[in-house]
Every structure is written in C-alpha cells, then in structure tokens.
Image (tube, rainbow, N blue to C red):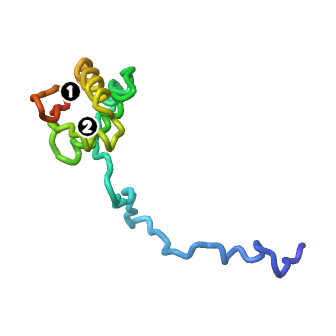
Amino acid sequence: MLMPKENDLFSDLNRLRIHSQPVNANQEINTRPLQVKIKGEFLKGPIPLSWLSVAAKIRAKSALALAVAIWFEVGRKKSYKVKLTKSLMARFGIGRKAKYRAIANLEKHKLVLVFKKEGKSVIVQVINL
C-alpha cells in the first residue's frame, strides 16, 4: 500500500466534494434554464428561420444586413411596419445605394412590402412566410 505524500493533491478526496443538500426522491428539481438579463441592445425574437434563410440566400451581400436591421427595428418598435432611417442604415453599415438594391431584392423575394414617399425614409412591412 502506498503512503500519501504530504503535498499530494489527491491524498484527501473528501475535500474536493461539493457539500450540498441531498435531493429527496419527492423533492421537485428546477430544470428551467436560467434567465439572463441582457444589457444593451439585442435582436428580439422570435425571428422566423424560413424568412431569414430566404434573405441569406439572396446574392446581394447587403440583403442579409438589411434583413437583420429590419428585424432589429421590428423588435424595438414592436411593429412589423418600420421606417428605414439613415441612422439605422449607418449602424448596420448599409450605404444608400446598397439599401435600395437590398430593399428591391427583399421585395422581389416577397419578404417585405415597401411604402415609398418622395423625400421621406422608406417604410417596409415584414411579410411572414
């Protein structure tokens, strides 16, 4: 039989045990996931994956960025009809011309309805698939 050394990390395994209350068979265990409070801004869901998949397959690279920007605004405004302002586009790195190409592509793939007024920001309404 080997004698434990004084500096041996594993000589006393009982000190490594987690001391908690034993669970009774009749005691209910909380299996809910922890609710984590997110600080700052975030995308609010649920975002339909079928909708986002169609936007991701569009060849224009700004189409997916615009789709994410639209869903960001939908979550913020709590409405499926949102205004695409210059500041929103700047936040997502979408230029003016890229914005109009991406809007045209999203409209062509029947993801949004577009409402335009001369001299005003474009308003889009998300179409749920």
Using the image, determine if residue 78 lies above or below residue 56: below
Using the image, determine if residue 109 lies above or below residue 43: above
Using the image, determine if residue 81 lies above or below residue 98: below
Question: Residue pushed farthest front?
Answer: 119
Question: Residue pushed farthest left?
Answer: 117
User: x and y percent of residue 62 in the render?
Assistant: 36, 29
Q: For the residues marked 2 and 1, what is the alpha-carbon distance in whole angstroms?
A: 10 Å
User: x and y percent of residue 120 in the render?
Assistant: 12, 34
Are circles 2 and 1 on residues that touch, CB within 8 Å?
yes
Q: Place residue 12 in its image quadrant.
A: bottom right
SS category of the residue bearing label 1: strand
Give the quadrant of the C terminus.
Answer: top left
SS category of the residue bearing label 2: helix
Residue at 15%, 41% in the rendered image: 79
Amino acid bearing label 1: Val
Q: Which residue is mark 2?
A: 70
Position of residue 91 in the picture relative to residue 79 (left or right):
right
Per the rendering, the mark at residue 89 is none
Using the image, determine if residue 119 lies above or below residue 72: above
User: x and y percent of residue 90 in the render?
Assistant: 31, 41
User: x and y percent of residue 17 in the render?
Assistant: 62, 73
Per the rendering, the mark at residue 112 is 1
How many numbered dots are placed on residues in this image? 2
Nearest to N terminus: mark 2 or mark 1: 2
Along the line of sight, the residue nearer the viewer: 101 or 73: 101
Position of residue 122 in the picture relative to residue 31 (left or right):
left
Q: Place residue 51 in its image quadrant.
A: top left
Along the line of sight, the residue nearer the viewer: 35 or 81: 81
Question: Residue pushed farthest top?
Answer: 108
Along the line of sight, the residue nearer the viewer: 31 or 113: 113
Amino acid bearing label 2: Ile
Residue at 44%, 69% in the rendered image: 24
